Image (spheres, rainbow, N blue to C red):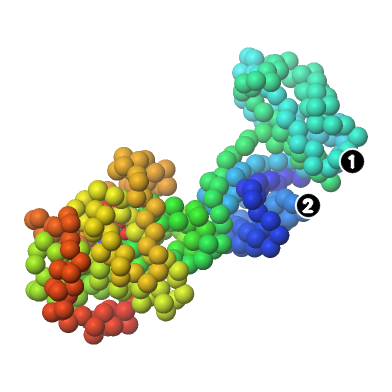
Amino acid sequence: MSDLILLRYGELGLKGHNRSFFIKKLKENIRRMLKSRGELSSAHGRLFFHPEGDEEEAVKILQRVFGLVGASPAREVELDMEDIAGAAADLISKLDLGEKTTFKVETKRANKSFYLNSMEISRDIGAQLLKRFPGLKVDVHQPELRVRVEIRRKAFVYLADNPGPGGLPVGTGGRGILLLSGGIDSPVAGWMMLKRGIDVLPLHFFSPPYTNERSLEKVKELVEVLGKWGLKRSLYNINFTPIQEELIQKVPGDYLTIIMRRTMIRLANRLAEKQGDKCIITGESLGQVASQTIESLHSTDVLAEVPVLRPLIGLDKQEIISRAQEIGSYDISIQPYEDCCQVFVPTHPVTRPVLSDIEEIEEDLELEEKLHEALENAEKF
Ligand code: ATP
Ligand code: MG
């Protein structure tokens, strides 16, 4: 009888080469995120993690690996009904059962050569458990406890479902640049695209001395949170001050935010080209602020050389906040912080910027050298 964690992944719609690519990335990510916590193995269409040390902690981490839909501590036994019931009893004996606990045995039989079918197995194991635990009572509809049995070349028995986050393994969707501020929204946007398999590079613009060290620390903490969800690329920091000073001098207040955003996109374009990123991700949500109207979004879209993904586009602020709380970024995001864009907020930003006006204003800007230098001097953490 051995202890392992049975890993379940969503394989819906995966075929042939895609499937092996998905599993290869998934394995890489598990090994990276759980390094030194145990060994990963695979056999007959299943992944297993063999924890060394704290099993509960390993399960918690596995529940943050995109692509996994469950991570259940299980017992592996021979294909023998006595052994299977024994393993189930052993797992149940560790629980704090009440006076009467309702339960149900659920069996999956992948190995069709086993002499009993799923129904027969469930019934037999259920009967054996009833004999051993007088506090148990069968309820096939809404049981408090589910005993799960999987019949493969060996039998696996487990109780807890421990759902994973689903999604696709990070890296199966190509690379993308996340414009990461210290706010609530962009970390959530990054999380959502990690979940869809994008290998995200967090890019932050800061403006010393207008923004302080603490704001930078905050962004690093947000990157750490995303790291717990499988982010693997390190933070890129671009000093935005020289560019911003140029903009403040020459751009009318109402167009400042929008042109600042366009400048960020220009920089992201260049970084994307250099590093093979296939998209730019932002935390924008339609109508949330003046710079997030359709017209404003369009004025950045026209510049982008790769698709701009805005996974929060249709979410309300409250929905974004709830998600941020689940992810663990919220408490960091609400700490006081200065964003380079907020330092010089215009009183009345345009809500319907006109592209030809923007282009006319930009004609007077001397940005090329500053953009080049900003990128050359980018810091990596
Ligand atoms: P957030 O909560 O992510 O800051 P927001 O609703 O406050 O979003 P804005 O501040 O207008 O909106 O920023 C819109 C988007 O532009 C952000 O979600 C982020 O993707 C990007 N962005 C803003 N400031 C920065 C910055 N300093 N560095 C990198 N990206 C930024
Ligand atoms: Mg912001």
**Rendered view: 374 above or below 290:** below
- Left or right: residue 11 versus residue 276 is right
Q: Which residue is depicted at the point 84% across and 32% down?
A: 117
Is residue 222 something that shows in the picture? no
The kind of residue on which mark 2 rests is His
The residue nearer to you, when weighing 21 against 68, is: 21
Indicate which disc residue 44 carries.
2
> For mark 1, what is the residue?
113
Mark 1 to mark 2 CA distance (whole Å): 15 Å
- Left or right: residue 300 versus residue 15 is left
Q: Quadrant of the N terminus?
A: top right
Q: Position of residue 132 (x, y in %)?
A: 78, 21
Please tell me how crowded label 1 is: few (under 14), some (14-19), or many (20+) other residues with Cα within 10 Å: few
Element on which disc 1 rests: loop
- Left or right: residue 106 versus residue 218 is right
**Rendered view: 202 above or below 87:** below
Q: Closer to the N terminus: mark 1 or mark 2?
A: 2
**Rendered view: 318 above or below 295:** above
